[in-house]
Image (tube, coloured by chain):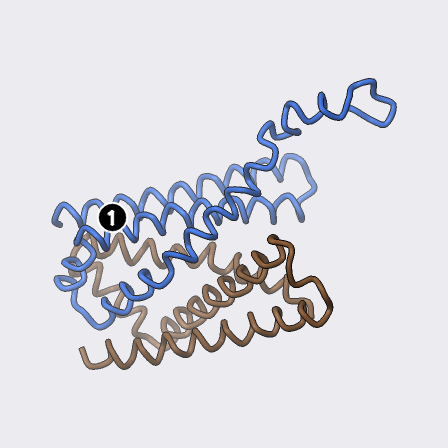
Chain colours: A brown, B blue
Amino acid sequence: MALSIVHRATGLALYFGTLLLAWWLIAAASGPTAYANVQAFTGSAIGKLIVFGYTWALMHHLCSGIRHFVWDLGYGFKANEREALTWGALVAGIALTVLIWIIAYAVGGGR
Amino acid sequence: MSGPSSMRTPLARVRNLGASHSGTSDFWRQRLTAVAMTLLIVPVVVVVIMLIGRNHAGAAQILGSIPIAIILLLFIIASTWHMKIGMQVVIEDYIHNEKLKIASVMANNFFCVAVALASIYAILKLSSGV
């Protein structure tokens, strides 16, 4: 598995994705019109896709980063352990993304 | 530079903490901010979910509350610092033209500081009432 490049790629995606977070906060501080513009974007199909991608990038980078912590602490260097950590990070990142979106729809969908 | 034929001792060479004069501080801060965000991610996700589907008045009220503002401020500081270091590593790995590299590192710093300051300003403004 060569997942370290995915860690870096998701990091780059998150780097530019913070613009979305900053835009959202600035809009909330600016007023109802600006905030409605953000909501129109995040509510659109392309907006939802970007936010979904952002969620996955964040969750994958988090899980993959925890894998790096394990290595930094000096554990998990055997071949089977490396494989397990890598697959674990990949699966956990996808699972957390789906879980967050299910909760988000369950909680926020009716508002 | 201290090559193999240098008369300087290994200790003398590391005393100035390398070419950046900061040694392993970026390595340490990258992990420090990563741990901070790992601790903060659950409350941050909860805050974002709390805001879904709310209009501006509802969102502004939630974002302006003191604990939520503090959680978001901590997350913004940790994340913009983390991404500044991460992007610099990427730049230093792939860009070998010296002038382009310096320009990229500068642009990276400007971008991260701008994102951080804009977000912090927005939260402080929400905290003091729009």
Residue A97 in the image: state x and y as whole percent. 43, 74
- Asked whether the viewer can see residue B1, the reply is no
Q: Chain of mark 1?
A: B
Q: Is residue A13 above or below residue B73?
A: below
From the viewer's perspective, tell me whether residue A7 is left or right of residue B119.
Answer: right
From the viewer's perspective, tell me whether residue B12 is left or right of residue A70.
Answer: right
Which quadrant of the view contains residue B102? Answer: top right
Which quadrant of the view contains residue B117? Answer: top left
> At 54% from the left edge and 42% from the top edge, which residue is drawn?
B28
Dot 1 amino acid type: Ala
- Asked whether the viewer can see residue A109, the reply is yes
In this rendering, the count of numbered labels is 1
Tell me the residue that label 1 is attached to: B122
Q: Is residue A60 above or below residue B83?
A: below
Label 1 sits on a secondary structure element that is: helix
From the viewer's perspective, tell me whether residue B63 is left or right of residue A6.
Answer: left
> At 48% from the left edge and 52% from the top edge, which residue is drawn?
B34
